[in-house]
Image: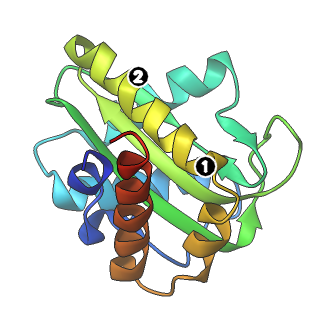
Amino acid sequence: MVLGSIFSPSLIKVDLESEDKNEVFEELVEVFVANNPHVSRLDLLDAIRAREDKQSTGIMRGIAIPHGQLDSISGVKGVIGISRNGIEYDSLDGEPVHLVFMLFSSCSSCSFHLGVLHRVATLLKDPAFFPSMLEQRSSEGVYSTICKYEDVLLSAFV
C-alpha cells in the first residue's frame, strides 16, 4: 500500500477554505509543515510554484496534482485537500478544482515520485473514486477511501 503510507489522516484536510490556487498551496503547505516541521515552508512553496509555472497541474474534472522536488524531503510525501466549493486553479479544462493531491519528493526519488503520480492517476481513472472522495466528511474517511481503492487496484494485478 504505497498511497496509504504517503497520506495519513493528519495529512488530509477536508473542507479547504481556499478560493484560488495560491491560497490552496499555502493552506496545504501549512498542513504539511505541521507534520514535517524540519522542512521549510518557503522551500515547499517555491518547489510547488516552480513546477506550476511550467504548466498547470489542474489536470481536469476537478482534480489537481501539484508536485515539487526538493532535497530536504526523503522519499515521497504528500498532503490531500478537498474543497466543497471549488478552487479557481487555471485547470487545463477551465473548471474549478475540488480534490488536490499535493506531492513532494527528493530529487533522488524521481522514479518513485513518478510511480506515485502514476498510482494516483490510475485511481482517478476509476469513475467511482472521485465522488467517493468528495462524500467523505473526515480525514479518516478520506484515508480509508484511498486505502480501499488502492487495495482494489492492487488486487486487480494479482
Q: Which residue is mark 2?
A: 114
| Image position of 93 (left or right of 59) | right
Q: Residues within 10 Å of mark 1 (few under 14, many from 20)?
A: some
Task: State the CA–CA distance, disc 1 to disc 2.
Answer: 15 Å
Q: Dividing the image into 4 quarters, which one contains the C terminus?
A: top left
Q: Residue at x 18, y 59 (%)?
A: 35
Check disc 1 and give the amino acid type.
Answer: Leu
Label 2, secondary structure: give it.
Answer: helix
Q: Residue at x 39, y 67 (%)?
A: 148
| Image position of 36 (left or right of 20) | left
Task: Please provide percent x and percent y for residue 53.
Answer: 64, 21
Task: Please provide percent x and percent y for residue 71.
Answer: 19, 20
The count of marks equals: 2
Q: Is residue 80 above or below residue 154?
A: below
Q: Earlier in the sequence, mark 1 or mark 2?
A: 2
Q: Is residue 42 above or below residue 5?
A: above
Q: Is residue 106 visible?
A: yes
Please, which residue is most extreme toward the bottom here? Answer: 137
Q: Residues within 10 Å of mark 2 (few under 14, many from 20)?
A: few
Q: Which residue is mark 1?
A: 124
Task: Please provide percent x and percent y for residue 15.
Answer: 55, 78
Q: Which mark is residue 34?
A: none
| Image position of 155 (left or right of 82) | left
